[in-house]
Amino acid sequence: MRSGNIEQFKHLSKFDSLKRFNSSMEQWYIDIHKQKLLTKSELIALKRLVRFSANVFGVCNAKIGTLVSATHNNNVGISRSTFKRMLLKVQAMNLITIHHTFNNGKQGHSVYVFNCYPSTKECNLNSVQESVEPLQQKQIEPAKTINLSKTNNILIDTYKDNVIPNVPVEFQNLAKCYYSPKQVLELWKCVKHSTQHYNDFAEQYVDYDSSVNKVELAINSFKQMIVNIKLGYTIKRSIFSYYYGIIQKKLDAQFKDWNLCFE
């Protein structure tokens, strides 16, 4: 995709009016607040990106420096690293898709495209999404909340010998007590996706080994999710988004010193 004016990217918009874009964002904000998926500073970054996406509904091609500078009103603003962390998180939520542009063989500005909230029908269904240089991530498919009292009746013969490929045995042995193999595989994708973003970010900005013990993180997060469900916590969207939120909080706690390094 070649660099260009914002009008060049109108075809990427998922919305046919500003009202519908704002309506979709209100639903995303509800999830973000309830599950505490973003910090206060990251939420400021997201809202600034939303404001810059009003001209072409849900599409922005402003540079990160421009977006960051726009938050510095009355000496209150965010850093470039905070904005990048926000991008990593909202990409993982599938709230935003990022397209990279090129000019004379060199990478140019990025184009941020907001996606519809999963349950809304407000999107412009006739819009055509161009898939040039897409974000390299696997989308998490939503699923209905599972009634724990009935999960033992789920057939788990989807895979040979009940072994789920590419999922650590320690995690799948625990998770299969509650969910089907297909769901366990999706839960593990949540772990892989979350840790990959943090490790990639750390490699660029932190001069020490910041790798995450995925199995330990997966098991601890899963146990917490099950306890929360048994205590009566409500899952609004899906077990996957809820599980991802728990993982995200644990990662944020592990890397809580990052803000001191970047701000």
Image (cartoon, rainbow, N blue to C red):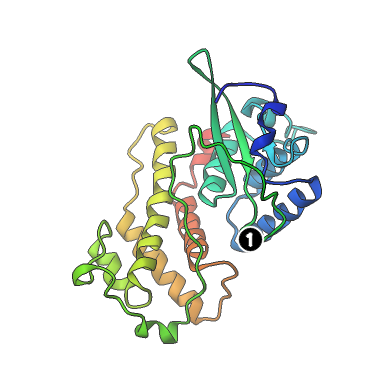
Circle 1 sits on which residue?
A: 31
Pick the residue in front: 167 or 11: 11
Residue that appears at 52% across and 59% down: 245
Residue 156 image-quadrant placement: bottom left
Residue that appears at 64% across and 26% down: 63
Residue 28 image-quadrant placement: bottom right
**Amino acid marked by disc 1:** Asp
Extreme left residue here?
Answer: 161
* Coordinates of residue 116 in the picture (x, y in percent): 65, 52
Name the image quarter holding the N terminus. Answer: top right
Pick the residue in front: 172 or 1: 1
Dot 1, crowdedness within 10 Å: few (<14), some or many (≥20)? some
* Coordinates of residue 152 in the picture (x, y in percent): 35, 84
Number of labels in the image equals: 1
Extreme front residue here?
Answer: 126
Question: Relative to 258, is 124 above or below?
Answer: below
* Coordinates of residue 43 in the picture (x, y in percent): 66, 47
Q: Is mark 1 on a helix, strand or loop?
A: helix
Name the image quarter holding the C terminus. Answer: top right
Residue that appears at 80% across and 33% down: 74
Q: In this view, does 42 lie to the left or right of 201?
A: right
* Coordinates of residue 160 in the picture (x, y in percent): 20, 68
Q: In this view, does 18 lie to the left or right of 213?
A: right
